[in-house]
Image (cartoon, grey):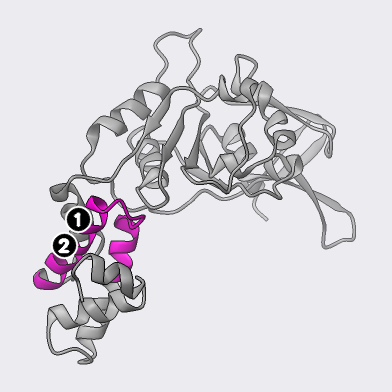
Amino acid sequence: MSPRDHIEIDGVRLYLAKPLGDSPPWVGREEVLAQLIAAWSRIDDDDVPLHPRLLGRPGVGKTTLATAAAARLGLPVYALQATMDTRPEDLLVSPVLAPDGGVRYMASPLVTAMIRGGAAVLDEGNRMSEKSWASLAPLLDHRRYVESTVAGIRIDASPEFRFVTTMNEDASTYEVPEYVHSRLMPQIHLDFPEEDEERAILQAQVPFADGEVLAYVLTFLRRAHEADLHYTVRDGLNVLRYAMKVLDRGEAGSAEEAVVAALALAVPAEELEALELL
């Protein structure tokens, strides 16, 4: 293992996580990108970046927005998925069995971002319990550190460290404690993209898409948005990719048939009928 893969803090060796690779491009909606970059900016040596939360339905691009903002600032991105089972040590430092039979301390992606000076993206933070949020409280105010009881060390964040959490708008989540809520500001809301932005996103991520197939998928998404159904551009991308595979394999005689075949595997028949797509 390369020396760059670990660091020693107060005599404890921490093995670091790897950053994410390339992420999808951010298309349109420059105003929310500007809001996140502004929240992460520092205007004075005594200033500290804010720790915003990105709110919106699943699939509207919250994680893509965070990685795009980090890319604009030249920061490596470290992502961590929060769940109801996430423990403080999962967020900070976890002990694992080393090849020699001893204990190796593994820094989480979040702690690695603190050390390396990267951007930490905590996905679906409102699925996490108060106990886990409490372990991040000193990181999310002027103190900017965490304490690992597992490794027995305090870890200070680099001045370049940035933090953001995404939060889905659904019922299967915890209520975020007030003392944490006040640390996660500002709130940046993402909604469905406009039609031209949605088209640009689909074209950017599926550049080989047939124009007619793309048009039918856009029709599905716009009608779903108008009917206040939960389908997002992520669903559109999956439908588009599958429809193109069906068309390429000769299993559909037209673009419309290919899209209908893809939608039949993703959308209940009654919703397709309500959207007049059957």
Spot occupied by residue 232 in the image (x, y as percentages of width and height): 32, 55
Q: Residue furthest right?
A: 101
Is 269 magenta? The answer is: no
Magenta region: which residues? 212-240
Quarter occupied by residue 34: top left
- Residue type highlighted by circle 2: Thr
- Say what secondary structure mark 2 lies in: helix
Residue at image location 21% in from the left, 63% down from the top: 220
Q: What is the secondary structure assignment of the residue under circle 1? A: helix
Q: Contact (CB < 8 A) between labels 1 and 2?
A: yes
* Dot 1 amino acid type: Arg
244 lies above or below 176: below
Residue hosting label 1:
222
- In the image, what residue occupies the spot 30% across and 32% down? 32
| Residue 216 is covered by the magenta coloring | yes
Relative side of 176 to 14, left or right: left
Residue 131 location, quadrant: top right
* Quarter location, residue 269: bottom left
Direction from residue 126 to residue 247 in the image, left or right: left
Horizontal relation, residue 259 to residue 166: left or right? left
Instruction: State the residue position of label 2.
Output: 219
